[in-house]
Amino acid sequence: MAKKSMVNREVKRAKLTKQFAAKRAALKAVINDQAKTTVEDRFKASIKLAALPRNSSATRMHNRCQLTGRPHAVYRKLKLSRIMLRDLASFGQIPGMVKSSW
């Protein structure tokens, strides 16, 4: 089981990412639009983007297992770590999945 503080940190990052997503997208659009905006406007937009909270960036988020909080070996589609996926498959909790054995 992961530390509660680490799981809470990821929850906070997800909340901040959702909160600042529109603002970040607007600033990035200004920065990337070289044809219509001046160099000064693009520079001001980049300063505003840098002033936003660091944890509001989507690249700061990390996938974690929904059951244990484990940060490594997490399947994106199921949001489960490999260990929990194997345990749930062994107990027959995941429809259509059986543990491989030969």
Image: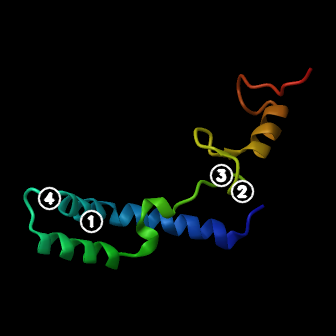
At numbered mark 2, what does the secondary structure look like: helix, strand or loop? loop
**Residue at image point 70% right, 48% down:** 73
Q: Check disc 2 and give the amino acid type.
A: Arg
Q: Nearer the viewer, residue 42 or 20?
A: 42
Residue indicated by mark 3 = 66
Q: Which mark is residue 23?
A: 1
Q: CA distance from mark 2 to mark 3?
A: 8 Å
Q: Nearer the viewer, mark 4 or mark 2?
A: 4
Other residues around mark 3 within 10 Å, as few (<14) / some (14–19) / many (≥20): some
Q: Quadrant of residue 90?
A: top right
74 shown above or below 91: below
45 is higher (above) or lower (below) than 86 = below
Q: Between residue 21 and residue 54, name the one nearer to us.
A: 54
Q: Is residue 91 visible?
A: no
Question: In the image, which disc is placed on residue 94?
Answer: none
Q: From the image, which quarter does the C terminus lie in?
A: top right
Q: Nearer the viewer, residue 21 or 28?
A: 28
Percent x, y of residue 40:
12, 75
Q: Earlier in the sequence, mark 4 or mark 2?
A: 4
Q: Earlier in the sequence, mark 2 or mark 1?
A: 1
Q: CA distance from mark 4 to mark 2?
A: 42 Å
The residue that label 4 is drawn on is 34
Q: State the residue position of label 2.
A: 70
Query: Quarter of the image containing the N terminus?
Result: bottom right
Circles 4 and 2, Cβ within 8 Å, touching? The answer is no
Label 4 vs label 3: CA separation? 42 Å
